[in-house]
């Protein structure tokens, strides 16, 4: 990457900044890594400015991802700090929030510092780290929440595991206001889900154990009632079911401090894919369709979109979950759960825009300001003085998802072979170019 010029002008872009309700043909002036202003195209250009030609593409705040798995420390065969954040930058994400289910688990200040040092050394984008809620994700003993918050943990989560123990969950929730943090909850009632691997309909068709919506909804119900008792702040990770959207909507109407995220795959893919899809070359029960929570029905996807549109769901998050081929190339029941998502999120979501289901500025809001607000991050807008985290993309550019196109070490996406439209051409963090398409 070239050294960062002091003054940069992004010219001839179509700027979309939902935070300021701005959309139009504007130039973006950046000085020393901060946004100076959005200015008309005919404004005077400082002689010394380094010019970036946007050529009519969309110029917007860098995306913020509340849910990624960077696999650091301890799982370099799945992803590294370099590869995971290169994938994020290639997908237009300038801030990613990494989950704590690593080896060792991020459950102490010592491990948290290790991640922060590695991010400092190797990350292309901003990395915020979540800390575990319980030691070793075992659900038995709470971590030192205040020490972890003081050391910079952005939120708390046992993601990958539900927190079974209601007393621990309640106690942890009650401390969130004091710590100014949120709990991101992976909602899965293991008593119902057990060894389930696919949504009921697909599971039945393929003779696999089911992971039904009830398993998600039951746990969300419990956590909403704990939130009602204990106060605090609760964020529901990767909402997948219509029933869950209804529960969150009702809790919000009651004034509870609850937020939620949805993944691009739960919005746009369904469990029909698990049953096989000839056009994608997916045989029935292909392990690349296995994800937790599983892909649901068309009705669920429709309800998730409804929840996004009416504000029940605050943010889109990828749950980027890279795996090595050996973790995935197994019979369905044994294969690892998870899709990579950083690099396919934008084009997949743009299908909703091209179908006329959501407006582009709204989509960008749910990828920028929406998530930034959930964790209280200083990101997601091109307001003067804000860090110059900027994404430039061509919403029409066609490309085919193929392993060699992906920066992530994980090639585990059900979208392999699919032609998508929309590609990030440049990503900047603090005014520094961290990704250029094809580089
Ligand atoms: Zn999860």
Image (spheres, rainbow, N blue to C red):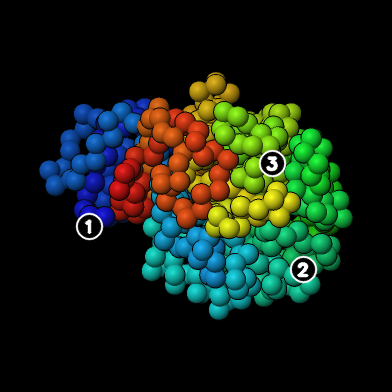
Q: Earlier in the sequence, mark 3 or mark 2?
A: 2
Tell which residue pokes out farthest to the right in this image: 191
CB within 8 Å, label 3 to label 2: no
Residue carrying label 3: 285
**Mark 2 surroundings: few (<14), some (14-19) or many (≥20) residues within 10 A:** many
Residue 352 position in % (x across, y down): 55, 27
Q: Residue at x 51, y 63 (%)?
A: 77
Task: Return the residue nearer the eye: 184 or 181.
Answer: 184
Where does the image place residue 345, in percent across and percent down from the top left? 51, 40
Disc 1 marks which residue? 3
Residue of label 2: 139
Q: Residue at x 79, y 49 (%)?
A: 196
Name the one closer to the observer, 38 or 348. Answer: 348
Mark 2 secondary-structure assignment: loop
Q: Quadrant of residue 162?
A: bottom right
Mark 1 residue crowding within 10 angstroms, few (<14) / some (14–19) / many (20+): few
Mark 3: C-beta under 8 Å from nearest atom of ligand 1: no
Residue 132 visible to the viewer:
yes
Distance Cα–Cα, label 2 vs label 1: 46 Å
In space, the residues marked 3 and 2 are separated at their CA atoms by: 31 Å
Foreground of the two, 289 or 282 = 282
Q: Residues within 10 Å of mark 3 (few under 14, many from 20)?
A: many
Which of the 4 image quarters holds residue 57? top left
Would you place residue 196 above or below residue 107 in this image?
Answer: above
Q: Secondary structure at mark 3?
A: loop
Q: Residue at x 45, y 41 (%)?
A: 402
């Amino acid at each position: 990457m070239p050294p960062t010029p002091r003054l940069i002008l992004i010219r001839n872009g179509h700027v979309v900044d939902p935070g300021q309700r701005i959309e139009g043909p504007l130039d973006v002036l950046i000085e020393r890594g901060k946004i100076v202003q959005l200015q008309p195209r005919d404004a005077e250009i400082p002689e010394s400015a380094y010019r970036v030609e946007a050529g009519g593409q969309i110029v917007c705040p860098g995306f913020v991802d509340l849910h990624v798995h960077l696999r650091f420390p301890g799982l370099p065969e799945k992803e590294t700090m370099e590869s995971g954040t290169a994938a994020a930058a290639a997908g237009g994400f300038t801030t990613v929030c990494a989950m704590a289910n690593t080896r060792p688990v991020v459950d102490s200040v010592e491990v948290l510092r290790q991640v922060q040092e590695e991010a400092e050394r190797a990350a292309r984008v901003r990395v915020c780290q979540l800390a575990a809620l319980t030691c070793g994700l075992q659900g038995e003993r709470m971590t030192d929440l205040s020490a972890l918050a003081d050391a910079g943990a952005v939120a708390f989560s046992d993601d990958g595991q539900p927190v079974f123990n209601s007393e621990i969950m309640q106690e942890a929730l009650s401390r969130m206001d004091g710590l100014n943090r949120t709990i991101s909850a992976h909602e899965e009632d293991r008593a119902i889900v057990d060894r389930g691997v696919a949504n009921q309909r697909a599971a039945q068709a393929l003779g696999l154990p089911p992971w039904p919506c009830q398993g998600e909804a039951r746990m969300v119900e419990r956590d909403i009632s704990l939130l009602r008792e204990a106060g605090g702040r609760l964020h529901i990770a990767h909402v997948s079911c219509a029933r869950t959207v209804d529960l969150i909507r009702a809790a919000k109407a009651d004034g509870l401090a609850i937020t939620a995220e949805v993944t691009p795959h739960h919005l746009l893919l369904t469990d029909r894919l698990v049953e096989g899809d000839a056009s994608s070359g997916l045989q029935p029960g292909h392990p690349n369709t296995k994800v937790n929570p599983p892909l649901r029905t068309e009705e669920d996807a429709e309800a998730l979109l409804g929840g996004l549109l009416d504000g029940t769901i605050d943010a889109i998050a990828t749950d980027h979950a890279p795996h090595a081929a050996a973790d995935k190339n197994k019979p369905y029941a044994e294969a690892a759960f998870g899709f990579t998502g950083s690099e396919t999120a934008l084009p997949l979501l743009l299908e909703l825009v091209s179908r006329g289901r959501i407006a582009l500025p709204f989509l960008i809001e749910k990828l920028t300001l929406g998530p930034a607000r959930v964790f209280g991050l200083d990101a997601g807008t091109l307001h003067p003085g804000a860090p110059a985290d900027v994404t430039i993309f061509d919403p029409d550019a066609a490309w085919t998802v193929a392993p060699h196109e992906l920066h992530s070490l994980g090639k585990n996406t059900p979208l392999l072979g699919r032609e998508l439209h929309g590609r990030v051409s440049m990503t900047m963090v603090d005014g520094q170019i961290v990704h250029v398409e094809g580089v």
